[in-house]
Amino acid sequence: MSLDTPVALIIFNRPEKVKGALQSIAAARPRQLFVIADGPRSSQPEDVAKCAAARAVIERVDWPCEVVKGYSDVNLGCGRRPSTGISWVFEQVEEAIILEDDCVPDPTFFPYCLELLQRYRHDERVMMVAGRNRFRMATPYSYCFCRNHSNWGWACWRRAWQHFDIGIKSWPKLRETSWLEETLGRPGAVQFWSDIFDRAYAADGQGDYWDYQWSFAMWANNGLAAVPKVNLVRNMGFDEEATHTTAGADERASVPSGEMPFPLRHPPVVAQNKEYDDFVCDRVFPLRGPENLYTKIRRKLLATVGVYY
């Protein structure tokens, strides 16, 4: 059986990681594979051979598949290469499943993405399908709709990605309003994201990140992500080869992937699961500065027992 939805794979200079990702993709046998590759860094002479080795892995595609290559001759970095590559994909197709080379999905990730891409294809309230969820989710449904999401294995539509702006030019105007408070609702998250958006705006597209700007695009358009109850993607990139995830002890590195049960149980309405979003904000973006006793006890209990509401 072949997957009709195109898959986009983002690679750079890690051939062993590309092998793992490609093996997972091969099991789904997509009819079309887009490969987004960054070029070698001028400051790292070894990148020439490593980038070539990573690209050589793509030549091993051995199922009926159109491989479309977007290979950069120069290094654009961790911000511009993924974002320009994703834009390039959506110039050619209406929807796609997107993976980075260190993301290894469970086989059920692909049919999960396919079903939700079809179900919400024309629903502008839903702007992405996430494949990763590192927290437990108390819901009877297969997924819920959230503001907080991960881009480590996801799917999207052209109609949503068209809102992406790496320079987040509308941030100064929104910063003067209560928009972020209304969107996130938690002081710690508001403080964190205000600092991030200030930095991204000042970088004017030259920073080594693009996912923060994607969150901005989603929230500025009141968009939601479908987040699975079961974590469907394992990130294998927590090592010395990584750019951002070099800490092997990072708790995100130990989150296993699981299998999504089918048939999917769909939420009856498209509405934010605010309880879950509030938990994620409190856990990931705690308020800086002194904490009251209640907050300290609550965080310690959550971390100890792993029950997330």
Image (tube, rainbow, N blue to C red):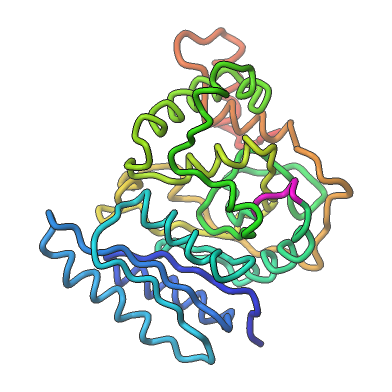
Identify the residue at image location x=67%, y=34%: 277
Residue 144 visible somewhere in the drawing: no
Residue 205 pos. (x, y %) = 37, 42
Residue 110 pos. (x, y %) = 63, 70
Does residue 254 lie above or below 305 as drawn? below
Residue 206 visible somewhere in the drawing: yes
| Name of the residue lying farthest toward the right | 268
Residue 125 in magenta? yes
Does residue 148 lie above or below 42 as drawn? above
Does residue 9 lie above or below 136 as drawn? below
Does residue 1 lie above or below 14 as drawn? below
Q: Quadrant of the N terminus?
A: bottom right
251 sits to left or right of 149? left
The quarter of the picture where residue 13 lies is bottom left
Residue 211 pos. (x, y %) = 47, 45
130 sits to left or right of 285? right
Residue 215 pos. (x, y %) = 55, 40
Write the start and end of the magenta stretch as one range: 124-128
